[in-house]
Image (cartoon, grey):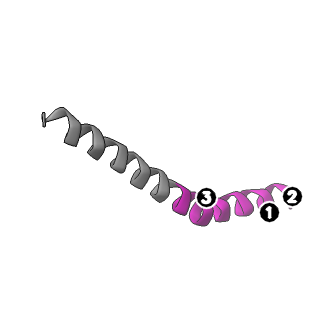
Amino acid sequence: MTRGIPIGVGLIVISFVLTGVYVWRANGEFDRLTRQILSEVKS
């Protein structure tokens, strides 16, 4: 097995992990910030 195959698999796994971290953070912190901005604009 060449070095490229484990590196490629690792890259795919890391991309899934980073996507999960972004979605988790976006659903928490970014939604809170968006609600805060909208409440300030509406006031």
Tell me the residue at 48%/57% (across/down).
20
Find the distance from the CA under tag 1 to the CA under tag 3: 14 Å
Secondary-structure class at tag 2 = helix
Q: Nearer the viewer, residue 16 or 29?
A: 16
* CB-based contact (under 8 Å), mark 2 and mark 1: yes
Find the distance from the CA under tag 2 to the CA under tag 1: 5 Å
Q: How crowded is mark 1: few (under 14 residues within 10 Å), some or many (20 or more)?
A: few
Q: Name the residue under label 3.
A: 30
Tell me the residue at 36%/43% (across/down).
12
Residue 15 screen position, x and y as percent:
40, 46
Secondary-structure class at tag 3 = helix
Residue 21 screen position, x and y as percent:
46, 58
Residue type pointed to by label 2: Lys
Residue type pointed to by label 1: Ser
Query: Would you say 25 lies left or right of 2 here?
Result: right
Q: Name the residue under label 1.
A: 39
